[in-house]
Amino acid sequence: MLNSYDRKTVVPIINSIGAYVYLVDVLEDGTFRFFAFNRLVEEDILNNANIIVGKRPEETMTPMVASKMNQHFQRCVKYRSNVVFEDSMDTPTGTRWTNHFLAPIFDINGRIVRIMATVIDTTKRKQAEQALQESEERYHALYDDNPARLTTLSPDGTILSMNAFGANYIGYDRDELVGTSIIDYIHPDDRQTARTYLQNIMKIHNKLHHVQLRGLKNNGDIIWTSNTARLSRNRDDDPIILLVSDDITETRELSEELSYQATHDSLTGLVNRREFERRLRNMLETAKEDKIDHALCYLDLDQFKVINDVCGHSAGDELLRQLTKLLQTQIRDQDTLARLGGDEFGVLMENYSLDQAETTSQSLCKAIQDYQFPWKGKNFQIGVSIGVVPVTETSGSITTTLSAADAACYIAKDKGRNRIHVCYEDDVEIELRHSQMEWVNRINLAITENRFHLYFQPIVSIASDDKIGKYFELLLRFEDENKNIVSSDTFMPAAERYGLATRLDQWVVETAFDWLNRNPENIKILFLCFINLSGCTLADDSFLEYVIERFRETNVPPDRICFEITETAAITNLTSAMNFIHVLKGVGCQFSLDDFGSGLSSLTYLKNFPVDYLKIDGAFVKDIANDPLDFAMVKAINDIGHVMGKKTIAEFAESDIIIKKLREIGVDFYQGFGAGKPQPIERL
């Protein structure tokens, strides 16, 4: 696309155009800079166009000419449409006249970043107009040989004359054109525009009128013409219209191709996200104005990455092309199917109820599920998760509508993939996901504004009952916009879902190590500092390298750090967790398995996990004084841990009676309000 190519790429493209062409960059400050010229401009107009490449008009031209060009460029940007203007320059052989046809070039976000100007030499036409006034003979010579179509019309559009070049170009003898209507040689779809154009010309004398129209040749070919006309009078003082028509078919086709590329995906030929959002915006407007219900479907392919990883990206591209054809067979002609991203598609269903959209989505889902993709002798299957949302008069903005569709799609993924989720009013699951998505911005902002804090909570040995803080767990806290302190249970699920958990874990490690490094007296009395890690962090090799590097850079002894991972995270990321534990235990770190007992399937894996501590899930601990079953569960977990040589820590030890029960069972440590409430680490 000409909006993104560099000069080396663009110049061969514009050199292929049989007209004078130059490109102008639209700068962020609203000014303009010459970007490139084609060979015709350099050889025939400017002699050495490269000397003004990269410069603004005011740096290379007279103030009057620069001001005029800037005004036309500004009109093109302001009205986001084609602009035509006429210019002249003095050359050693006299004055040269040109028509400049400006076409805006948009980037993917709809911003005009470049202007393409096609320049047509109108010097001969100007000479013809001057000759008309000076000499009848000279006028006819220039008139017939002019490489543009010159036509004289009566006020109603009847052709009074046409030059020989123009008549021959459209495939007629000029004598057979006289007396016919110019409208007959205009494309049927543009004839009403042409009639309005003639009417406007008749209203103002000596004013130039411009319009682009599709014309018809005698053989049926369609050509685009740029038409310039003015009202004049003949010798008898009767009104006549002087019309000059230049062929801009090549320029117009290039402009249409650029427009197509700006609104369509090059791989599948479907409309792209920018055009999809424009059509969705129109759909939202019609829903509000005309009270018509529509629907939006958001599709995300399941297991598409497997195809790319196993077969390569060429296979993935071919699969997307085949799925495009498959999806098009499942929707109506008036529906819009778009490619929104790598393996994401969208469907706009106009004048469609939510129930109808759900039925169609089920068909889309089944079609993809049943599709066998053949590649090099093997067949592959994928699935799709689809979110369906209504587009009605009560719908919000385009942003909120797309956000709801995206959230519905990911709910479908969370529920097992290869299914759909329909978003109805007051959808609790959608609200929950939106709440989590809002946390993403809040977390990023809080990191930037340093509004995360470390708290500590003592872990007390039942044998010594020492609460001085020789054992403690570091807890992450968030300070909200109103200075309220929020626990990690509130925001960590969102952080894990949207890939921010590792960043937060790194912040905790960095802050904790820096604090310990600055306070060596705490290291002296410290037995063990527990630091929580999320499941996704265990699979991040760069985080493992970061921790090892932090040990090298600080005076924190590795044997004073115990990394804490949840039972669920360890089992879900078994291979990664084992590697992570093995490497850091090799440098002296200890490990604790948190929330143990919440998933008893882990008993199978426990004997293979080289952890040092088991944290008994507080859900069992908090009622052991009243519930015999909970008491038995805690005792069983404690016994298993001791048999395996691991120390046990009971969470949620909130009262003396709970601590007494834990002592009866023989638990090694307890943690909870009975041991001490979480406090800022600065108070340790």
Image (cartoon, rainbow, N blue to C red):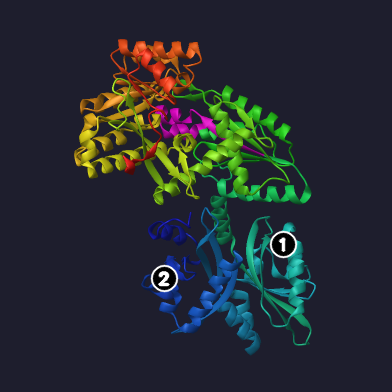
Residue type indicated by callout 2: Glu
**Marks 1 and 2, the one that precedes in the sequence:** 2
Residue 478 disc label? none
Q: Are marks 1 and 2 in contact (CB under 8 Å)?
A: no
Residue 225: quarter of image: bottom right
373 in relation to 402, above or below: above
Q: Residue at x 45, y 17 (%)?
A: 599
Q: Residue at x 35, y 42 (%)?
A: 507
Q: Position of residue 231 (x, y in %)?
A: 72, 80
Which stretch is magenta? Answer: 296-319
What residue is pinned by disc 2?
42
Residue 186 disc label? 1
Numbered disc 1: secondary structure: loop
Q: Residue at x 77, y 71 (%)?
A: 157
Residue type indicated by callout 1: Ile
Q: Position of residue 672 (x, y in %)?
A: 41, 28
Residue 296: quarter of image: top right
Q: Between residue 638 and residue 294, name the one nearer to us.
A: 638
Q: Tell me if residue 151 is in the magenta stretch.
A: no
Lateral position of residue 540 relative to residue 431, left or right: left
Separation of disc 1 and disc 2 at Cα?
Answer: 35 Å
626 in relation to 119, above or below: above
Lateral position of residue 266 relative to residue 529, left or right: right
Q: Is residue 589 visible?
A: yes
574 in relation to 50, above or below: above
Q: Residue at x 20, y 34 (%)?
A: 557
